[in-house]
Amino acid sequence: MLVSGNASGRLPDFTRRAKYIAFSSTVVLVLKKDAVTDKGILDRSRRFGGWGAIAGEIAKFLGGQWTARSYRTLSGTLRRAIEAGVADR
């Protein structure tokens, strides 16, 4: 999650929705807890909310306006930037 605005306060290590790791004052790493069935698919009757709920939860603890960015998206963007010669490893 990335923040716009000022973030301050204390982030818990985990809640019922997710596990949180404060990476910096503007970045929080999130492992979202999804309820799954015995078959390994999402259980729609036990949802804890999507990424918007996670962003709201972080804002409640730290303030600011938070938005999610997928690791895969960021990793792919960085890889393409390195391949194009516009970024270093």
Image (cartoon, rainbow, N blue to C red):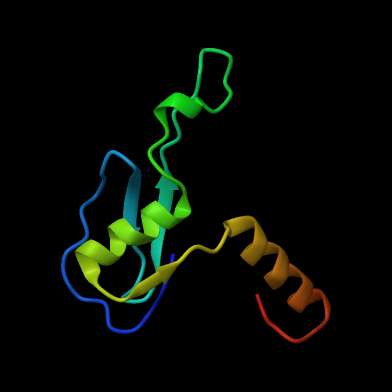
- Answer above or below: position of 83 versus 85: above
- Answer above or below: position of 72 versus 83: above
- Image coords of residue 33 (percent x, y): 41, 38
Where, by quadrant of the figure, is residue 75 drawn? bottom right
Seen at 40% across and 69% down, the residue is 66
The answer to whether residue 34 is left or right of residue 20 is right
Seen at 25% across and 44% down, the residue is 15
Where, by quadrant of the figure, is residue 58 drawn? bottom left
- Answer above or below: position of 38 versus 54: above
Furthest residue to the right? Answer: 84
- Image coords of residue 30 (percent x, y): 41, 53
- Image coords of residue 29 (percent x, y): 41, 58
**Front one among 37 and 11:** 37
Where, by quadrant of the figure, is residue 7 drawn? bottom left
Seen at 52% across and 12% down, the residue is 38
Q: Quadrant of the N terminus?
A: bottom left
